[in-house]
Every structure is written in C-alpha cells, then in structure tokens.
Amino acid sequence: MIKRKSKLQIDYSLLVLTLALLAFGLVSLYSASTVDSYKNFGNTSYYIKHQLMYGAIPGLIALYILSKIDYHLWLKLMPWIVGASLLLLALVKVPGLGFSSGGATRWLHLGSITFQPAELAKLAIIFYIAAWADRKQAALNDLYFGLLPTLCVVILYAVIILWQPDLGTMLVLIGIAGVMLFAAGINWRYLFWTAVAGTLSLYALIKLEPYRARRLTAFFDPEFDPKGIGYQIKQALLAIGAGGLWGYGYGLSRQKHNYLPEVMGDSIFAVTAEELGFFRILAILALFLLLALKGYSIAKKAPDNFGKLVAFGVTTWVILQALINIGAMVNLLPLTGIPLPFFSYGSSSLLVMLAAIGILMNVSRHSMTIKRP
C-alpha cells in the first residue's frame, strides 16, 4: 500500500551535487577568464561578476522558487511555454532586438540584459514531449497521429535554431528529444528510421557549409589546418596533456594567455584540466556521474509519467551537454561549441539550467512524499 507524507521534503543530495558543480564551475570560470577580463575591461573579475549577477544568483533564486512550485503546473502551461519559446527564438532575427556575435545571431538584447532563447527552448521541448507522452499514451506508436506531429514540432525548433545559426544547440535539442521519445516507449523501428533520416540531414548540413566540413575533417585528422580550424582542438589537447596528474596549479594555466580560443566557453574544461590535473578532474567527472545517477533515479521514482519524463529530460540535457563538451575537448567528438554545464561563461545557460534543476528537485520532492512498503 502506498501512503503519502503530509510535507514535501528537500532532496539534499541533489542540492549538494548541484551546488558543488556550481562552485567548481564558478571557481574555474574565474581562473579561465582573468586574462580576457583584464585585457577587455582592465580588471580580472568582470566576467565572474557578470556570471554571478546575471546567471548564478538569479539561477539559484529560480531553483529555490521552482523547487516549491508543483511541477504539474507546467503541464497546464505547456502550450504557452512552447509558443513563447518559439516567439523568442524568432525575435533574435528582428533588427534592434537580436544581438550578433561571431557571425551568429543567437541573443536578444534587452537593455543591459542579453538572453539566449535557445536555452529556454531546451526546457520547452522537454515539457512538450513529456506532456505529449502523458496525454497521448494510446497514440504513442501511431505514426500519423502520434509520432509525426511531435517530430514536426521538434523539427520546427531545430530549423529556427539552425537559422541563427547554432548547429551545436540544435543537435543537443534533437538528442534530448530522441532520448525522451525512447524513454516514453516509442517503437524502436520508428526511432531507427528517424535517426537514419536525421543522420542524412546532418550530413547534408555539413556539406552545405564548408566550415562544418572542415571541422569534421579536423576531428578525423587533428593535423589538418593546424593554424586554422584544427587549432583549437590541438591547443586543447596540449593543455590537457600538460596538466598531467596534478596540474600546474589553480590560476597557472598557460593556454589561457591568448593561446587557446574560447577559454571561458567550450574550452574551459581544457583550461581546468591544465590547472588541476587528471586526479582532480576525476572529482568533477564524478560529480557529473553522481548527478546523472541521481537524476535518473528521480525519474524512476517519479509519481507519474509526466514527472518521470521531465526528470529524465532535464537529467539527459545536463549530461548530454557535458559529454559533448568534454568529448570534443579530448577529441572523441567533433567541436560543436557546446558549453560545459555550470562551468562555461553564459548567464542564460546557467540561469535556465539552475531553473531546470529546481523543477527536477520538485519532482523529487513529490516522489519523496510516497512511502513504499
């Protein structure tokens, strides 16, 4: 017999894991950003202050608030969340609102605040697939009334994000959707042929853009164009290798001194490995592993199908991004420009991810109210 406790409990293990990763991330970001911060603003703390003010502090507030809001509310608000996220994605192309950097238009510039709508889109697609699977369980394996309409929504998100362009974020979003559909119980044959179609589409996208083809070539041959497209991965491997077992020491990275590109972004793992070394990096990897185990355990114990899939989606989002980022830095995957969760500079990414952890915590709090004999 299942009984419910009267009061929601806090999942302290999830909270501690999140705060530990956030602390490691902020400390690593401060070290990685000092050179660029001094060069651009005349002090060594501009970027860490910005990350705290617009990412970490609002994110922790959002985590606290959302951990107390019943996650079933998002099921009711799902159409509004999807509509708002699609609108925000499209608004980045509106002159005066969209902000461009590095040849891409991915940000909304609202006064002193810059926001990347693609981060919210990841959370929106999690809510959409979880709500769809919860409400349409009888049609899960109906190709025309179940899977195809869902795929059309995922493709719509993917096309708008690719328009910015942001291939890396598009791949993460599709990866989250694919894993969630598998968890929802979609027929494996449908998933297989969907994956085949997706792979062929990805190949076409790579062939259409020469810089993407060069990145793929550099992945298979790191010596290809060592001063151009292959430079970042070569310097990243040099940084990781130079760190050895114990690292140079905190703050003593050499590669961050204008050698390694994107030291605050997708290359932050390489800088951290150079300073901390192999054994200390294992501690960070262990935290991600423990977060994965905790998140999937929450999904397994969730009180209902919607909660299960939301927890599954949020956990997959964090771990998939970490795997892609770290895999690229050690040359196991091609470079895609995906940030490392909790570590890479980017207030939008950190804020939305902490908010998502708050939602995951609420699912856990509801599952913890159930006493099982």
Image (cartoon, rainbow, N blue to C red):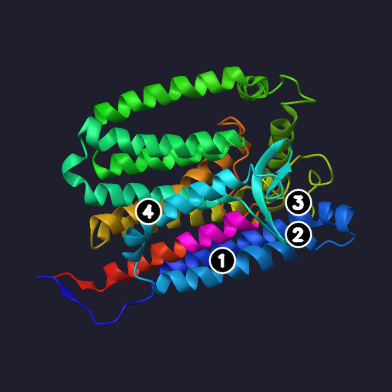
Q: Which residue does the numbered mark 3 point to in the structure image?
A: 248
Secondary structure at badge 1 equals helix
- In this rendering, is residue 29 above or below 259? below
Q: Which mark is residue 79?
A: 4
Identity of the residue drawn at 58% across and 58% down: 350
Decide: few, some or many residues near mark 3? Use Cα within 10 Å; few <14, some 14-19, many ≥20.
some
Report the amino acid beneath label 1: Gly
Front disc: 2 or 3: 2
* 320 relative to 62, above or below: above
Query: Who comes first in sequence, dot 4 or dot 2?
Result: 2
Residue type at numbered disc 4: Pro
- 322 vs 49, left or right, is left
Q: Which mark is residue 222?
A: none
The answer to which of marks 3 and 1 sits earlier in the sequence is 1
Q: In the rendered structure, which segment of residues is drawn in magenta? A: 347-356
What residue would you read off at disc 2?
A: 47
For the question of whether residue 345 can be seen, the reply is no
Residue picked out by circle 1: 59
Indicate yes or no whether the magenta region holds residue 260: no
